[in-house]
Image (cartoon, grey):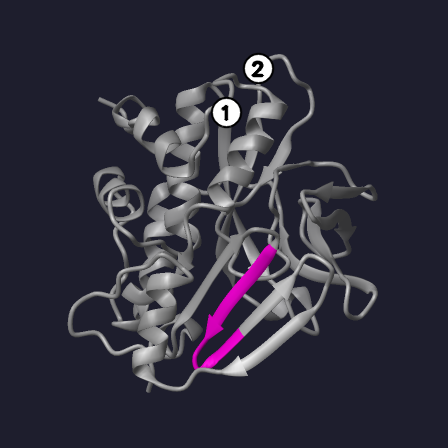
């Protein structure tokens, strides 16, 4: 039996609170994407313990749907891809280079998972991504069209073509930075398909390598009620829909655990320490 046939769509939609249509069309794609973003938090607690989280369907269901936990990009987008395929979409897994703060696209490895989504009868493909742990993340899927600004919920994005030496067209996702008043590069990708074994290897590297940023400190985010909340180590940052940013240092381990429980909806595994 395939992973798609095993996917429990009812349980997934209950978890994200989606009560809309179950059609393979653009409106459903955008709606389910946004509901997922506002329901399941981004977190790296497994990687913080130097453990690569499982990407098997049963384990993703147990962790992200049945527990008060979240995950990082491979978990979120693998789960989302299963839901979309069950709804009738065609999904291609893509590997992207995160270029936030980078001088050159080529200076970063392909460590991020994104999705190319196609709906039956719709000639327009879409970029979908519910697993990008940054303020520049997509809230809704956007058409794969270069040079056009998209408003996805309270955020603004665009896709552009970037110059490079490879034979495939390079796409670059940009988010509008309200604080700086300019476009900021997020990640670059081609449309080359990547498969589960590829992401198994990348996931292991990111989840266990002592040099990986996700094995160094807690990194947790949620998008709720028009605000983006991020715990990055000891720093808690709230970014509101109007661009206002409020930042403070977390007092200690007890407060960090309280924040994960009350603000992010996450149960911290027994015996785990969040702060160094």
Q: Position of residue 34 (x, y in %)?
A: 55, 40
User: Residue 8 is drawn in which quadrant?
Assistant: top left
- Indicate which disc, 1 or 2, sits on the residue closer to the N terminus: 1
Q: Give whichever of 154, 159 is nearer the camera.
A: 154
Q: Residue at x 70, y 74 (%)?
A: 103
Q: Is residue 205 visible?
A: no
The tag on residue 52 is: none
Q: Picture coordinates of residue 73 (x, y %)?
A: 44, 53
Badge 1 density bin: few <14, some 14–19, many ≥20, Cα 10 Å = some
Where does label 1 land, which residue?
90
Question: How far from the left and from the top, in percent, is residue 10?
Answer: 33, 25
Residue range highlighted in magenta? 227-236
Q: Are marks 1 and 2 in contact (CB under 8 Å)?
A: yes
Whether residue 7 appears in this view of the structure is yes
Which residue corresponds to the image point at 34% horizontal and 26% vertical from the top-left? Answer: 9
Structural distance between the alpha carbons of marks 1 and 2: 8 Å
Name the spot of residue 238 as percent of width and height, x first.
58, 68
Task: Check disc 2 and report the residue beneath it.
Answer: 120
Q: What residue lies at 40% left-to-right and 86% top-to-bottom? A: 251
The chief SS type of the magenta part is strand
Secondary structure type for disc 1: strand
């Amino acid at each position: 039996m395939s992973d798609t046939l095993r996917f429990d769509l009812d349980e997934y939609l209950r978890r994200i609170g989606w009560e809309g249509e179950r059609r393979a069309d653009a409106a459903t794609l955008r709606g389910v994407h946004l509901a997922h973003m506002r329901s399941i938090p981004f977190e790296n607690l497994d990687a913080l313990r130097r453990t690569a989280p499982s990407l098997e369907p049963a384990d993703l269901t147990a962790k992200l749907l049945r527990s008060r936990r979240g995950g990082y990009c491979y978990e979120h987008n693998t789960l989302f891809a299963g839901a979309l395929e069950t709804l009738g979409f065609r999904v291609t897994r893509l590997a992207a280079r995160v270029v936030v703060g980078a001088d050159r696209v080529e200076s970063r490895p392909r460590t991020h998972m994104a999705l190319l989504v196609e709906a039956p009868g719709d000639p327009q493909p879409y970029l979908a991504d519910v697993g990008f742990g940054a303020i520049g993340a997509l809230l809704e899927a956007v058409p794969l069209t270069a040079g056009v600004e998209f408003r996805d919920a309270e955020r603004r994005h665009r896709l552009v073509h970037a110059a490079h030496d490879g034979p495939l067209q390079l796409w670059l996702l940009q988010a509008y930075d309200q604080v700086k008043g300019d476009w900021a590069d997020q990640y670059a990708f081609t449309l080359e398909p990547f498969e589960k074994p590829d992401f198994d290897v990348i996931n292991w590297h990111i989840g266990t390598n002592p040099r990986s940023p996700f094995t160094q400190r807690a990194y947790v985010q949620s998008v709720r009620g028009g605000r983006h909340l991020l715990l990055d180590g000891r720093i808690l940052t709230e970014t509101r829909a109007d661009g206002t940013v409020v930042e403070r240092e977390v007092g200690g381990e007890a407060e960090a655990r309280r924040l994960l429980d009350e603000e992010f909806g996450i149960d911290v595994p027994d015996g785990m320490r969040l702060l160094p």
